[in-house]
Image (spheres, rainbow, N blue to C red):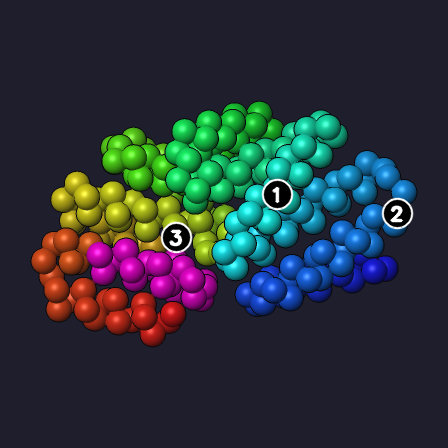
Amino acid sequence: KALQYSSAAGHKAFARSAHRSAVRHLEDGLLALSHLPESADSVSTAIDLRLDLRNALLPLGEFARAFDYLREAEQLAIAARDRRRHAWAACHLTMHYFLRGEYEHTIEYGERARALGAEIGEVGIDAVANLCLGQAHHSLGSFPEAIGFLTRAVTALQGPLVGARFGMSGLPSVAAHTWLVWCCSELGEFDEGLRRSAAGLEIAESVGEPWSVASATFAQGLLRIRRGDLALAVDTLGRGLDVC
């Protein structure tokens, strides 16, 4: 019961962005789990709790702790031959290497996650991996390649997946549009960038997810600055600041 209630409390806390509470409850769940006999189900739960802890620690900026839990989840999934959980661990490691500025590892793990996602037919894994690969290529200045990956992510995250978070702070569907806007800004493709920014902002506002609304307005504001529409940029960025 301690495991069940701790896990449920952690998920509820994460859903309302109470990340420190989420971490506390999820770590209580891991402690409770350590008192249970090992089984296939307990190993699966151990992996899931570590993946959840990564999700809660990331918005707090506690990257080292999150990374440690994620590597533990990866090793457990490999040992258990759990392809789905291995794929998600690889997918989240892709994001971590991106945040650390290690773009070679980002691309390596991103391609690994895509391959695993395709093997098990998990659309969400493929979409998030494409998002991370797009971010890495953007950071390397490879904007056409980034646009290719990000467009695939946008295409996959339609219908019921448009509001899925997959453990991320914001909506991946909006993030894919946001990074496309930044690529368009760099290439001077302002009309396409405005179309993408409007689409991303519409999704964020329809779901009512504040992080995504803020990031979408930030991208749109940056594009307007690059285009020279400074009055409109001030208005857009002001809206985003209010959300923050």
Residue type, label 2: Leu
Q: Which residue does the numbered mark 3 point to in the structure image?
A: 174
Residue type, label 1: Asp
Question: How far is the residue under mark 1 from the one under mark 3?
Answer: 28 Å
The mark closer to the camera, 2 or 1, is: 1
Residue 106 x/y as whole percent: 44, 34
Going 49% across and 42% down the picture, which residue do you hit?
A: 96
Q: Is residue 80 above or below residue 227?
A: above
Going 39% across and 34% down the picture, which residue do you hit?
A: 103
Return the residue nearer the eye: 85 or 46: 46
In the visual, does 239 lie left or right of 94?
left
Residue 117 x/y as whole percent: 55, 31
Residue 29 x/y as whole percent: 76, 55
213 within the magenta span: yes
Residue type, label 3: Val
Return the residue nearer the eye: 164 or 32: 32
> Is residue 124 something one can see in this rendering?
no
Which residues are drawn in magenta?
A: 201-222
Q: Earlier in the sequence, mark 2 or mark 1?
A: 2
Q: Which residue does the numbered mark 2 point to in the structure image?
A: 36
Residue 187 placement: quadrant: top left
Secondary structure state at the residue bearing disc 2: loop
Q: Earlier in the sequence, mark 1 or mark 3?
A: 1
Tell whether label 1 touches label 2 (CB within 8 Å).
no
Disc ID at residue 68: 1
Question: How far is the residue under mark 2 from the one under mark 3?
Answer: 40 Å
Disc ID at residue 235: none
